[in-house]
Image (tube, grey):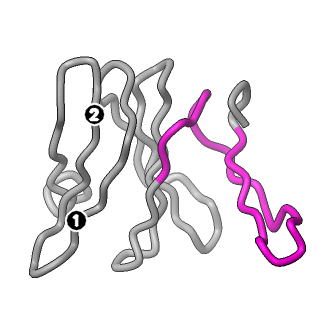
Amino acid sequence: DFYSHDLVEIDMAPLKIRRTFKTVLNCRSVAYDPKRDLVYAASFITGDLDVLRYSDGSLVKRAYVGKKPSGFYLDQDDGADALYFGSSTGILKLDLATFLG
């Protein structure tokens, strides 16, 4: 939801809400990491990035990544492990192994 802390997962067949994650305000960008079973969600307003455990919605990590993050691209091909996104400062690359520890 654009004006709340809710990130809604929808079952596309019946178009019904499956569940709701609590995350950053004004979440505009979301990416799913199948390798770690994590969800990355960024707030356009605050610049915070939440890392959520997909299985239970718990918060793994929150970090400030810059103003107006948007347009996630998760690259895990051929040994890569990075999340790319735009921000007010340009295109950024987040090394996930380093970021998540």
Magenta-drawn segment: 6-30
**Res. 75 mark:** 1
In the rendered image of this protein, does residue 28 appear above or below residue 77?
above
Return the residue nearer the eye: 89 or 53: 89
The residue most toward the left is: 79
Q: Is residue 13 left or right of residue 48?
A: right
Q: Quadrant of the N terminus?
A: top right
Residue 20, given in percent of the width and then of the height, sits at 76, 55
Q: Is residue 27 left or right of residue 5?
A: left
Q: How many marks?
A: 2
Please tell me whether mark 2 sits on a helix, a strand or a loop: strand
Residue 12, given in percent of the width and then of the height, sits at 77, 71
* Number of residues whose C-alpha sits closer than 10 Å to that of mark 1, classed few (under 14), some (14–19) or many (20 or more): some
Residue matched to label 2: 86
Residue drawn at point x = 85 percent, y = 61 percent: 17
Q: Quadrant of residue 76?
A: bottom left
Residue 99, given in percent of the width and then of the height, sits at 21, 51
Return the residue nearer the eye: 65 or 10: 10
Does the magenta-highlighted stretch encompass residue 31? no
Q: Quadrant of residue 13?
A: bottom right
SS majority, magenta: strand
Q: Quadrant of the C terminus?
A: bottom left
Q: Is residue 98 left or right of residue 63?
A: left
Q: Amino acid at mark 2?
A: Gly
Q: Is residue 8 left or right of residue 43?
A: right
